[in-house]
Amino acid sequence: MRVLAALVILWGLTMMSCAHGDPLKQTITEKTYSGDVIINNLHNIGRYDPIYRSVVELVETKKRHSGTGFIIKNINNNSYALTAQHLCKRRGIKFIVNAVPDENNSRKEFVAKAVYVSEEEDDVCLVRIYDTGKYFQEVKFAEKAPKTGDAIMTIGAAVGIFPTKTDGYVIGYDLLGEEEPDQPPAPAKRLITSLPVAPGNSGGPVYNNEFRVVGMLVAMHPRYNHSSICIHVDTLNVHMNKYFNRK
């Protein structure tokens, strides 16, 4: 009888486990493509991340170069995204734009054109994405620059896998991407971070734990291959103002 009772209890526990499972695992499985939760960041699993609603994959229509961008403004029926200048090269370059897949693993596709290109040193480009309606969410920018050691994250299309999310921290400031990372930060055009760089995630937003953008990922550091170069948020604001406040 004792053996039989033990078997009945074991069967009951097994059925409960099969019926309900691990709630966290169910959430991750159901939301893998929705962008509502972080699925590859162990420190923040289950937290809502609005940046997924803002990030896009950009594929150049002729040479098929790909990179990442993020939505900064929705105006009329179009959206504007920041990306890296080395993906655009000049105004008029056209892109196919892929949004983050939805919960059905389907993704919307748009067309875009580069409308503003900075000097090569600043590596900033602005693209206009056509007929987006209210599909994308605008990012929010940090009011203060990040400090050394601050945690940061990015989302991109690393080696063609989109969206790929990674995290790291701020190492320091770097004026031109050539000085030592611990040099004084004035005037800071770039951030040096531990975020990994891979083909396709150039132009991705770099943001903090409050989901505020502090920079844009653009390249591996030329002297320190364990670190990456990100355009400072102040530089991004300068170029956005140049375009949107032009007369």
Image (tube, helix red, strand yellow):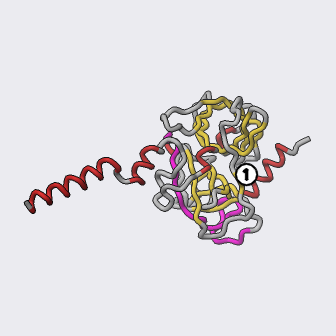
Q: Is residue 139 above or below residue 132?
A: below
**In the image, 39: left or right of 8?**
right
Which one is nearer the viewer's eye here, 134 or 245? Answer: 134
The C terminus sits in image quarter: top right
The N terminus sits in image quarter: bottom left
Q: Position of residue 154 (x, y in %)?
A: 58, 53
Residue at position x 72%, y 47% in the image: 124
Q: Which residue is mark 1?
A: 122
Q: Position of residue 52 (x, y in %)?
A: 58, 46
Q: Quadrant of residue 185?
A: bottom right
Find the residue positioned furthest to the front: 1
Which one is nearer the viewer's eye here, 3 or 158? Answer: 3
The answer to whether residue 93 is visible is no
User: What residue type is disc 1 on?
Assistant: Asp
Residue at position x 84%, y 47% in the image: 242
Which one is nearer the viewer's eye here, 219 or 52? Answer: 52
Q: Residues within 10 Å of mark 1 (few under 14, many from 20)?
A: many
Which one is nearer the viewer's eye here, 206 or 24? Answer: 24
Q: Regarding mark 1 in the picture, which secondary structure is present there? A: loop
Q: Is residue 63 above or below residue 228?
A: above
Q: Position of residue 227 (x, y in %)?
A: 55, 60
First to last magenta residue range: 160-185
Is residue 166 on the magenta stretch? Answer: yes
Is residue 124 on the magenta stretch? Answer: no
Q: Position of residue 76 (x, y in %)?
A: 78, 34
Residue at position x 63%, y 70% in the image: 148
